[in-house]
Amino acid sequence: MKAYFDSSSFAKRFINEAGSDTVEATCAEATELGLSVLCVPQIVSALNRRRRERTLTRAQYNSAKGRLLEDVRDADIINLTTSVVGSSISVLERSPARALDALHVGCALEWAADLFVSSDKRQLDAAKRAGLHTRKV
């Protein structure tokens, strides 16, 4: 199964919070992992925000970042192509999705994902409207 994760759902692999168990189980059943080129910077941004808020220690940050970089080595990274942008525009015209959420849906469509994983209801609704099977985490 080709599973595409938006950034906030994939971040649950590195930050223990509600939905982390579902993310781990979904990764275990996936045969291919798809992520947007936006994913790593978005997760590193979230990790750094937690460092600034002092909810993550330097050691925890380094560990999470190292695991993230290791995980993405085996992932298919979907770039922001003309086709992805076109798909995201269609998503934006058919749903109240936000721009980055629509880009993630566009990446999943371009990659022909079997499953789109997110924790954002609006994004999941947009992905369903675009024809993707979804899983909420």
Image (spheres, rainbow, N blue to C red):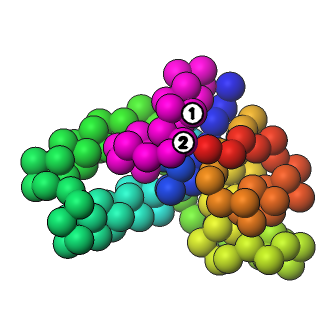
Instruction: Name the side, left or right, on which 35 lies relative to 44.
Output: right
Residue 76 x %, y %: 51, 40
Asked if the stretch drawn in magenta spans residue 21, the answer is: yes
**Magenta segment, prevailing SS (helix, strand or loop):** helix
Instruction: Name the side, left or right, on which 88 lies relative to 69.
Output: right
Figure quadrant of the C terminus: top right
Secondary-structure class at tag 1 = helix
**Residue 30 visible (yes or no):** yes
Is residue 1 shown above or below 60? Answer: above
Residue 40, quarter of picture: bottom left
Query: Which residue carries the number 1 mark?
Result: 22
Query: Which residue carries the number 2 mark?
Result: 19
- Mark 1, residues whose alpha carbon is within 10 Å: few (<14), some, or many (≥20)? some
Which segment did they paint magenta? Answer: 11-31
Residue 33 x %, y %: 55, 35
Which residue shows up at 17% across the image and 47% down it? 60
Q: Of residues 133 and 74, which is closer to you in this image?
A: 133
**Residue 78 visible (yes or no):** no
Instruction: Name the side, left or right, on which 46 lies relative to 107.
Output: left
Which residue shows up at 60% across the image and 21% down it? 29
Which residue shows up at 85% across the image and 53% down it? 128
Which residue shows up at 27% across the image and 38% down it? 67
Secondary-structure class at tag 2 = loop
Residue 117, quarter of picture: top right
Residue 114, quarter of picture: top right
Residue 30 x %, y %: 60, 25
Q: Which mark is residue 122?
A: none
Instruction: Tell me the amino acid under the disc marked 1.
Output: Thr
Figure quadrant of the N terminus: top right
Instruction: Tell me the amino acid under the disc marked 2.
Output: Gly
Q: Mark 1 near mark 2, Cβ–Cβ under 8 Å?
A: yes
